[in-house]
Image (tube, rainbow, N blue to C red):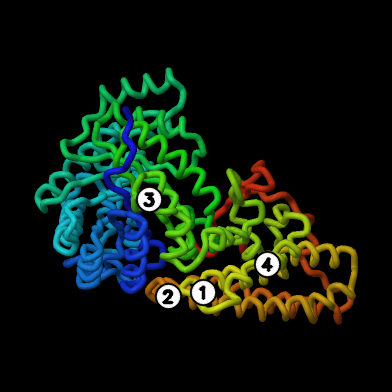
Amino acid sequence: MSITKLRELGVMIDCSRNAVISVPALKNFIKIIAEFGYDYVGLYTEDTIEVEGEPYFGYQRGRLTASEIKEADAFAREHGMELRPYIQTLAHINQIVDYADYADIIDVNDILLVGDPKTEELLDHILETVSKVYSSKVVNIGMDEAHMVGLGKYLEKHGYENRVDIILKHLNMVVGLCKKHGLKPQMWSDMFFRILSGGEYGTEDEAAAKALTDEFKKNVKIPEGLELVYWDYYSTEKSHYESILAQHKALTPNISFAGGAWRWMGFTPYNSYSIIITEAAMEACLAQDIDSCVMTMWGDDGTECSIYSVLPVLLVAAGKGGKLPKGCDAKELFKEVTGYTTDEFMLLDIANPGCEGKKKNNLSKILLFNDPLLGVFDSLVPENVSDYYEKAAEKLKAVTSNQERAFDAIFRTQEALCRVLAHKAELGIKLRKAYQGKDFETLKHIKEYDIPVLIVLLDKFYDEFKLQWKKEAKTFGFEVQTIRIGGLKQRLVDIEDLLEDYLITPGLKIEELETEPLPVGYWLHGVPIDEPEYGRYEKFVTTSRLTW
């Protein structure tokens, strides 16, 4: 008989991709999700934690100090919750790879060199810190996505070795350090699956699943006391999660699950999609007797989306996991706790046209940074998108038109983004068409009206976004947003100047607009037009390289 309620439910906040949550925001977040019935908050810190003996760890990145974590930890306990550390002990500590202090212990990319005494020393320092500043004894040691482990400096030193063996050797060392510091480790489970199954994270094919299970039993011995965390943020089908969970159970009975509240594909959340995958995943976990789940809130490519923007997803997870207060109405609870209706919060998805149900895209970020002259992503611009964004902005404005409420900054940021996109999304197409058709009146209008208006709107968006950031995160990391949005503003000024020269200089050519546009050629090629997702800022703005 399957279980009907989770033993524990948590939320993990990404503090490693430019935005480190401030202590006041963390306390506020803890209060809200405590009302939803959550048991713990995890802080994902690759390097953004103060570690004794490691001065470059989180240097000028807003690292969480020992006193800040202890303060937040005590506050969580006061509210019947736990604060938990999420760290990395193999890969993903990418901010330290360029420091000379760590050059000797980087295997390849952002993967630590297994077997090196200096690697063990670093991890000992991190785990000692974690054991001192958190009252929780549970630690997530990461170890995910180390795809090239053993294929860099390790290969040069030791020759080729089976990568499962390399990971197990390293894992046993890390688990030993955890025991030394009184910690109970858990790790993301993907690397065991990917290495043994040609890169796949489990399989729904029964025959392949049996073969994979047999391979596990033969090659993988999970250290005693280690919990494996199956993470999956993609499937909308309960059967998919059940199948992969069953394969995990072949490795160890000590399994938990990590789902996703999508806020990591730009400025705008995927609440609608996240709710569907969360419902399917939670139902599968209960059916498979998995009683521990966490909702991850990653911040890929700069952490532009508010931590509060996905509160409807966290509410659904709590409801499906049996964690809401007994007898309460979920929507009434949401209104009581936040001051907003769930319908109002669901409007936050609106800047991504067509992003509802099982469909998802991050068009808002793509269209914001898509360079108007190069137009590399112009093939993704939907029809009548300017009208769409004008209407979307008005709907968001209506949410904040009454008395000031706690999260109005999020809605104002999204409104300002939509107003920018109403003028920016089709600019490149309009510009190229007018240039190639020698429509000088339209080009003059773009120079004298469209671009000046757009710059004003972009300034407004920047100000609103900065205010949202200040309410949630430390100031470190926002310089990236200044560079990106400021770069877009300067590019618009340059286009304005270019058009002025073109309109008064006979025979002058604008080389970028002489080029015939091609469909977007990155891995989006062939993706349905209403589901484009691409997260690399540098490719939106140039086909050259920002850095080497």
> Dot 1, crowdedness within 10 Å: few (<14), some or many (≥20)?
many
Residue type marked 1: Ala
Q: Position of residue 412 (x, y in %)?
A: 57, 73
| In this view, 201 is above or below 262 | above
| Residue 421 tag number | 4
- Residue 24's place in the image compared with 208, above or below, is below
**Residue at horizontal 58%, vertical 68%?**
414
Q: CA distance from mark 2 to mark 1?
A: 9 Å
Numbered mark located on residue 471 in the image: 2
Q: Which label sits on residue 106?
A: none
> How many tags in the picture?
4
Marks 3 and 1: in contact by CB < 8 Å?
Answer: no
SS label for mark 4? helix
Could you tell which of marks 4 and 2 lies nearer the N-terminus?
4
Residue type, mark 3 in image: Gly
Quadrant of the image containing the N terminus: top left
Looking at the picture, tell me which residue is in the foreground, 519 or 295.
295
Residue 420 can be seen, yes or no: yes
Mark 4 or 2: the one toward you: 2
Q: CA distance from mark 4 to mark 2?
A: 24 Å
Q: Is residue 235 above or below residue 407?
A: above
Disc 1 from disc 3: Cα separation:
32 Å
Quick one: SS at disc 3? loop
Residue highlighted by disc 1: 409
Q: Using residue 398 as the reference point, say whether residue 269 is left or right of it.
A: left
Residue on which disc 3 sits:
327
